[in-house]
């Protein structure tokens, strides 16, 4: 599969240079970082949440966990985890569990944890379990322009 069509179109539309890095199939983001030989603090993962107003994509480093209570307070929303069934309908060009952290490319409101804003390079899922995308930190922030930012995760 390589890079999902939606992600590729988004990156090209923004004129951003990127690299694709292959790795063995993995079961979660921490193992992806290890398999791809990259720092887990620079691998952006997304956690899809929802409430009565819709979906929200929370983006944190692979080494972090979302503090749902903190995010609920910051946004004044009663958010809960979205189900796997709901994810499949939203990310039709991605394999389950390999969701790129580019909510706006999929029409999903996005919030970015501040811990990712100072990274030189950012890596993220390409849409399958065998590839990740690398962009500079500056370009990653360009892809997330208009997204809210906050501190809502902790290192595990």
Image (tube, rainbow, N blue to C red):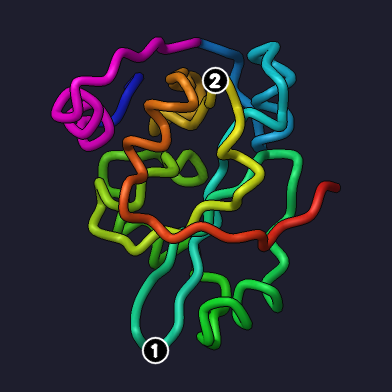
Which residue is rendered at x = 41% and y = 32% of the image? 140
Element type where label 1 sits in the image:
loop
Question: In the image, is residue 6 part of the stretch drawn in magenta?
Answer: yes
The quarter holding residue 50 reads: bottom left
Which residue is rendered at x = 25% and y = 52% of the image? 106
Q: Position of residue 56 (x, y in %)?
A: 42, 67
Q: Position of residue 60 (x, y in %)?
A: 61, 48
Residue 29: mark in rendering? none
Inter-mark Cα distance, 1 to 2 = 35 Å
> Around disc 2, counting alpha carbons within 10 Å, would you say few (fewer than 14), some (14 to 19), or many (20 or more)?
some
Q: Nearer the viewer, residue 7 or 11?
A: 11
Which residue is rendered at x = 47% and y = 31% of the image? 125
Residue 52: mark in rendering? 1
Instruction: Find disc 2 in the rendering and name its residue.
Output: 121
The magenta span reads 5-21
Is residue 119 positioned above or below 151 on the image?
A: above
């Amino acid at each position: 599969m390589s890079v999902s069509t939606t992600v590729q179109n988004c990156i090209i539309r923004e004129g951003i240079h990127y690299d694709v890095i292959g790795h063995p199939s993995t079961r979660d983001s921490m193992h992806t970082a290890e398999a791809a030989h990259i720092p887990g603090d620079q691998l952006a993962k997304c956690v899809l949440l929802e409430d009565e107003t819709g979906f929200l994509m929370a983006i944190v480093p692979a080494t972090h966990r979302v503090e749902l209570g903190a995010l609920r307070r910051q946004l004044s929303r009663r958010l809960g985890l979205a189900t796997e069934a709901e994810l499949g309908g939203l990310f039709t060009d991605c394999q389950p569990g390999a969701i790129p952290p580019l909510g706006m490319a999929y029409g999903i409101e996005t919030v970015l944890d501040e811990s990712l804003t100072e990274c030189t390079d950012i890596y993220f899922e390409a849409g399958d379990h065998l590839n990740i995308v690398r962009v500079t930190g500056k370009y990653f922030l360009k892809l997330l322009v208009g997204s809210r930012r906050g501190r809502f995760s902790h290192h595990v």
